[in-house]
Image (cartoon, rainbow, N blue to C red):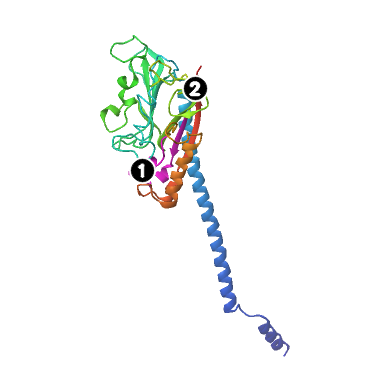
Amino acid sequence: MTNRLALAIAQRTTRAFTLVEMLVSVVVLALLILIVSQLVNHATTITRTGNKHINTDTQARLVLDRMGLDLGRMLKRTDVDYYLKQPNGYKGHGNGHGYGLQKQAGQQGSDQIAFYSAVPGYYPSSSWNSPISLVAYRVNENSNSASYLKLERMGKGLLWNGVSNVNIPAVFLPLTIDATWPAATNNDNSNNSKDSDYETVGPQVFRLEYYYLLKNGDVTDTPWDTTARPTQTSITSPQSIGLTDIEAIAVAIAVIDPASRSLVSDSSLSDLASDMADFKDAKGNGNPAKKIGDLEDQWKTAVLSAVSTGKTSTNSSVPPAAASAVRIYNRYFDLKTL
């Protein structure tokens, strides 16, 4: 009797989970799994974005440091040639995007610059190498090249003057860079734009623009003080002034990481670069003069527009995720001219 009573009591006090309790447990477990997966996805997105920024930051630092070394050792004399944008000679506007937006047929995209610098270069076969190289930077505009829309640098080692009548030595005016080394000043699909001494130094840099900070405080694309030199038409006419009036050269670049670049076609990336305005000194044209930061702000606006619409101003498709990875960098290089 006692055993039967104990068994009955045990049967009444032990029972299995009900169906409702099981369903509640499953729902709670599913919610926990969902929350954890969202946290993991969010962390992955943050990590991926951070890695892209680290990638572009590293690229920009390497490129700008290399430029800083070259410009810091630039041969700053009034009796040597420079290939840089000015109202006459190398026309930064005429060869750019037609005052900023959307380049036309026959126009190049980004700025070019070429100068002599006391840095190592690729020398011809000779034991009489000078310490001077011709340095040039450009974003390759040859659509048939593997370096298309990538930043290139030329470091052409020069011979001492008078060493050879065959190989071109380091030269002074009146000989000019564009007449002696056409690849330093051309940028298209022609043979004049090809030179084995070019190397890709910024594979993620697809846009390059520079302008000048003058000693009078102006930021401009004219490399001299137009108030103090009203008759000057170039850095060599009517007098050779070189870079006398320039305190610093400001360089702006647009960089995209490799993973994002793979999502954008070359034509769309070119259109996005064309939406990034040239620096245009508006003095005398009825518009206010440019200020420090204006150019970079316009570039940022062009990128944000592509992020929000997924297209450039010409309706070329740019995935918003790729556009959001584009970063703008700027650095001023003090020329330390007298």
Could you tell me which residue is drawn at 53 percent across and 58 percent down?
Answer: 38
Q: Position of residue 46 (x, y in %)?
A: 52, 49
Q: Secondary structure at mark 2?
A: loop
The answer to whether residue 196 is seen in the rendering is no
In the picture as drawn, the residue positioned furthest to the bottom comes out as: 1
Residue hosting label 1: 271
Packing grade of label 1 (10 A; few <14, some 14-19, many >=20) is many
The answer to whether residue 271 is seen in the rendering is yes
Label for residue 335? 2
Residue 148 found in image quarter: top left
In the picture as drawn, the residue positioned furthest to the left comes out as: 191
Packing grade of label 2 (10 A; few <14, some 14-19, many >=20) is some
Q: Amino acid at mark 2?
A: Leu
Q: Is residue 88 above or below residue 24?
A: above
Q: Is residue 17 above or below residue 267?
A: below
- Taking depth in this image into account, of 272 and 181 the one nearest to the observer is 272
Q: Residues in magenta?
A: 250-278
In the picture as drawn, the residue positioned furthest to the right comes out as: 2
Q: Position of residue 153 (x, y in %)?
A: 39, 28
- Taking depth in this image into account, of 13 and 189 the one nearest to the observer is 189
Mark-to-mark CA distance, 2 and 1: 33 Å
Q: Is residue 322 above or below residue 33?
A: above
Q: Amino acid at mark 1?
A: Asp
Label for residue 282? none
> Is tag 2's residue or tag 1's residue first in the polypeptide sequence?
1
Q: Position of residue 169 (x, y in %)?
A: 34, 14
Q: Position of residue 105 (x, y in %)?
A: 29, 37
Q: Is residue 63 magenta?
A: no
